[in-house]
Amino acid sequence: MPEVFRAGWPKGSFTADWKPADYERARKAWPKLLAYTKTIYEAGVRLTIGTDTPTPWIIPGESFHEEMKLLTEAGIPAAEVLKMATVNGTRTLKIAGPDGTIAADARADLVVLERNPLEQIGNTRGISAVIREGEISAPAQLRLE
């Protein structure tokens, strides 16, 4: 993780003053949060993926994969989670046209995976190539230093 991210985490962590009881309370609440997430999904609320912010302990890129994993742990099917990570974002942001889809005349960047994420959502981590604005890159070429 680049130092620029690590440097600010201790100062901004909302858990900096937590006691063991606070962590225990959060651990006990977690199953309820997962159930609530599934409830709002089942109610038809459009969900998107994207916690990549300057929030302490949220690592850009890594958190995207972790969020997809957590949504499947909540009981949401992997195909729906992938939809949340792609087309739902463009629809929520009201980006006109077929962005976020793979189709003729669509505008979309593409991540080529080594294994099927429908079988295991964690397979989204096995990126073999990224196609962005028509340029093909290996994942190592895109890493922050």
Image: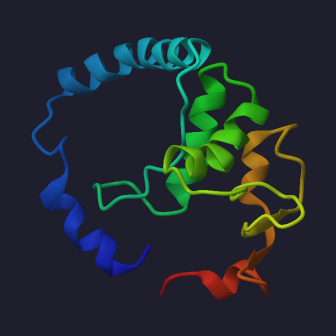
Q: In the rendered image, which quarter contains the N terminus?
A: bottom left
Q: Looking at the image, is 50 positioned above or below residue 72?
A: below
Number of callouts in the render? Answer: 0
Direction from residue 22 to residue 29 in the image, left or right:
right
- Residue occupying the far left of the picture: 17
Q: Residue at x 36, y 58 (%)?
A: 53
x, y percentage for residue 20? 20, 27
Between 26 and 124, which is closer to the camera in this rendering? 124
Q: Residue at x 35, y 15 (%)?
A: 29
Q: Residue at x 54, y 58 (%)?
A: 62
In which quarter of the view is residue 142 placed? bottom right
In which quarter of the view is residue 95 placed? bottom right
Q: Residue at x 19, y 50 (%)?
A: 13
Between 38 and 58, which is closer to the camera in this rendering? 38
Between 99 and 40, which is closer to the camera in this rendering? 99
Q: Looking at the image, is 78 positioned above or below residue 100?
A: above
x, y percentage for residue 123? 79, 50
Between 54 and 25, which is closer to the camera in this rendering? 54
**How is the protein colored in the picture?**
rainbow
x, y percentage for residue 97? 68, 57
Direction from residue 23 to residue 119 in the image, left or right:
right
